[in-house]
Image: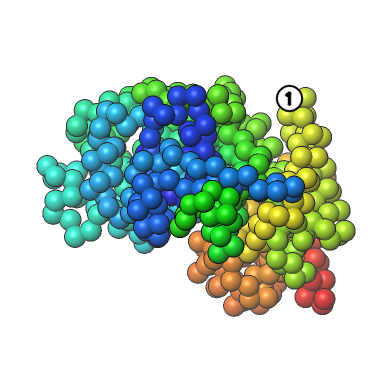
C-alpha cells in the first residue's frame, strides 16, 4: 500500500517496483492525500501511467504497471480493509514533511487542528467493535488513517508489516515510529505493544527530480506511446533509493532495480538533504528573488552558482567524504540541475520552508558554528527565505499563521521570530542573526 499518490511516488517507488525482477509478483494499492484527483485520473486506466524520462538529449517513455488500485484517500473503509490483510506486506508514504504533523522530536503536533481531531477519534474508536462505528468522521490526516489501519490489522491478526516513509526528513523511520507510538497511546489498549512487536519502521533516502506535469507532457506521452494518458509523469533519468530496516512480511527485489540497502543510512541522508535539497532551497529563494522560474534558470546565474558551490563547500566539511564520494555527487548534481528540459519550478521547491529549512539548512549552520566557522553560505539561504517572506511572498507554509504574525511585527522582531520557527538556537547566536539581518536589509534595497 502507498499513502500520498502523486507524481513523485509514481516516478520513484512505483517505478522501482515495476522494474524489480519480481515486480510482477507485487502490486501497489495507492491512496491519495489531500486531493482525490490522481485516483480519479488513474482508476479508469487500471493504474497504468506513462513515465517520461527527460534527459538533455531527448525523452524516453515507458508504461508503469505496478499500481493495481488507485483510491481516494478519504475512502478509509477501503484503507482499513486492505491494511488488515496479511497479504499486505508494506506501507510506503510520500506525504511531504508537513504531512506528518510531528514536531522535530517526533511527537504529535497537538496544536494541529486536524491531528487533534483525529486523536480524539482514535481514543473513541478504540472501544468500538467496528472502527468506523459511532464516529461522525473518519480520520483525515495521513497518520490518523495509518494508525486506524494498524489497529484494524491488529484486530484481524494480520501479522507483521513494514512502514516505509519516503519523505525528506532525517531518520524518517525512527521519527515516524515515535509519532505513531505516541498517537497509539491515546487509543490505549494493546495497540502500542502490538506495534512494538509487529511493525518495522524503515528509514530511507529518496532522490529523483520530478516536476509537475503540464498539458504539453500529456501530448508528449501520447506521441511517444500511442496511448492517451490522463496522468503521465515526467522525471529525470537519475533515480536513487537507499533503505535501512527490516521487512518482516517480505518485499520486492528493489535492489535489482538499483535500490541500495545499508546498515547505517545517516550519512546518505545528510548528503542528500544538505547537498541536493539544501541547494534546491538556496536556488528557490535566491532565484525567485531574482525573477527566475526554474532550477536550471537560477543555476545559470553566475552569483547563484557561486553561492551553491560555497554552500556545498560548507556542508561537505561535515560529511564523511571517504564513503560518500562528495566530489562525484556534486558534479552529478550540477549536471542534473542544469538540465534545461526538466522544468523544476522554484515555486514548487519554495513551499513549506520552515519544515524544509529545519532539516536542510539549520543543521549545517549549527555544525559550522560549532566548529568556529561563520556559516556565511548557509546563513545566506535563511536570509533569502526571510527576505521573500517579508516581501509578502505566499510560500504555502504549514506554519503560515505564525509566519503571518511575524511579518506583521516590526522588521527587526520579525526576523527573529521567523528564524526561531526554523531553529530557535540560532536566535541566540548574535553573529548569525546579525548576518541574516544585514543580508535582509541589502535585499530590501535592491
Which class describes the residues within 10 Å of circle 1: few (<14), some (14-19), or many (20+)?
Answer: few
Which quadrant is the N terminus positioned in? Answer: top left
Residue that appears at 45% across and 29% down: 23
In the visual, does 18 lie left or right of 110? right
Residue that appears at 54% across and 42% down: 62
Res 138 → quadrant: bottom left
Q: Position of residue 180 (x, y in %)?
A: 37, 40
Q: Secondary structure at mark 1?
A: helix
User: Label 1 belongs to which residue?
Assistant: 323
Q: Is residue 301 above or below residue 106?
A: below
| Residue 282 in view here | no
| Residue 41 in view here | yes
Pick the front one: 407 or 343: 343
Which quadrant is the C terminus positioned in? Answer: bottom right
Q: Is residue 130 above or below residue 84?
A: below
Residue that appears at 40% across and 60% down: 37
Q: Position of residue 441 (x, y in %)?
A: 79, 72
Q: Position of residue 287 (x, y in %)?
A: 75, 63
Amino acid at each position: 500500500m502507498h499513502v500520498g499518490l502523486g507524481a513523485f511516488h509514481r516516478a520513484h517507488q512505483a517505478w522501482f517496483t515495476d522494474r524489480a525482477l519480481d515486480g510482477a509478483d507485487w502490486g501497489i494499492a495507492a491512496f491519495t492525500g489531500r486531493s482525490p484527483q490522481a485516483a480519479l485520473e488513474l482508476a479508469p486506466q487500471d493504474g497504468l501511467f506513462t513515465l517520461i524520462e527527460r534527459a538533455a538529449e531527448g525523452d524516453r517513455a515507458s508504461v508503469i504497471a505496478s499500481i493495481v488500485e488507485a483510491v481516494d484517500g478519504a475512502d478509509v473503509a477501503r484503507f482499513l480493509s486492505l491494511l488488515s490483510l496479511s497479504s499486505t506486506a508494506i506501507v510506503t508514504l510520500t506525504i511531504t514533511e508537513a504531512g506528518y504533523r510531528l514536531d522535530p522530536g517526533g511527537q504529535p503536533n497537538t496544536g494541529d487542528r486536524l491531528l487533534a481531531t483525529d486523536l480524539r477519534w482514535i481514543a473513541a474508536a478504540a472501544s468500538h467493535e467496528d472502527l468506523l462505528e459511532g464516529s461522525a468522521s473518519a480520520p483525515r490526516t495521513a497518520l490518523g488513517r495509518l494508525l486506524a489501519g494498524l489497529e484494524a490489522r491488529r484486530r484481524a491478526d494480520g501479522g507483521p508489516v513494514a512502514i516505509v516513509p519516503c519523505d525528506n526528513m532525517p531518520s524518517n523511520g525512527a521519527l515516524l515510529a515515535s509519532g505513531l507510538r505516541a498517537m497509539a497511546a491515546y487509543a490505549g489498549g494493546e495497540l502500542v505493544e502490538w506495534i512494538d512487536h509487529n511493525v518495522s519502521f524503515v528509514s530511507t533516502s529518496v532522490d529523483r527530480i520530478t516536476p509537475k506535469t503540464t498539458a504539453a507532457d500529456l501530448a508528449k506521452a501520447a506521441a511517444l506511446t500511442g496511448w492517451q494518458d490522463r496522468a503521465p509523469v515526467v522525471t529525470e533519468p537519475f533515480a536513487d533509493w537507499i533503505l535501512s530496516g527490516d521487512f518482516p512480511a517480505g518485499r520486492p527485489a528493489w535492489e535489482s532495480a538499483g535500490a541500495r540497502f545499508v546498515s547505517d543510512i545517516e550519512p546518505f541522508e545528510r548528503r542528500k538533504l544538505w547537498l541536493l535539497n539544501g541547494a534546491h532551497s538556496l536556488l528557490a529563494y535566491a532565484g525567485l528573488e531574482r525573477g527566475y522560474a526554474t532550477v536550471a534558470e537560477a543555476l545559470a546565474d553566475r552569483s547563484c552558482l557561486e553561492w551553491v558551490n560555497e554552500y556545498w563547500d560548507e556542508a561537505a566539511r561535515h560529511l564523511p567524504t571517504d564513503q560518500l564520494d562528495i566530489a562525484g555527487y556534486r558534479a552529478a548534481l550540477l549536471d542534473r540541475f542544469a538540465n534545461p528540459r526538466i522544468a523544476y519550478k522554484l515555486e514548487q521547491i519554495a513551499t513549506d520552508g520552515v519544515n524544509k529549512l529545519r532539516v536542510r539548512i539549520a543543521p549545517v549552520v549549527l555544525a559550522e558554528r560549532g566548529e568556529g566557522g561563520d556559516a556565511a553560505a548557509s546563513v545566506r539561504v535563511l536570509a533569502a527565505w526571510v527576505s521573500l517572506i517579508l516581501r509578502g511572498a505566499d510560500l504555502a507554509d504549514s506554519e503560515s499563521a505564525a509566519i503571518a504574525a511575524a511579518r506583521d511585527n516590526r522588521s527587526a522582531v520579525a526576523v527573529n521570530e521567523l528564524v526561531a520557527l526554523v531553529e530557535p538556537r540560532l536566535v541566540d547566536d548574535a553573529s548569525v542573526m546579525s548576518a541574516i539581518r544585514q543580508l535582509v536589509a541589502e535585499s530590501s534595497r535592491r
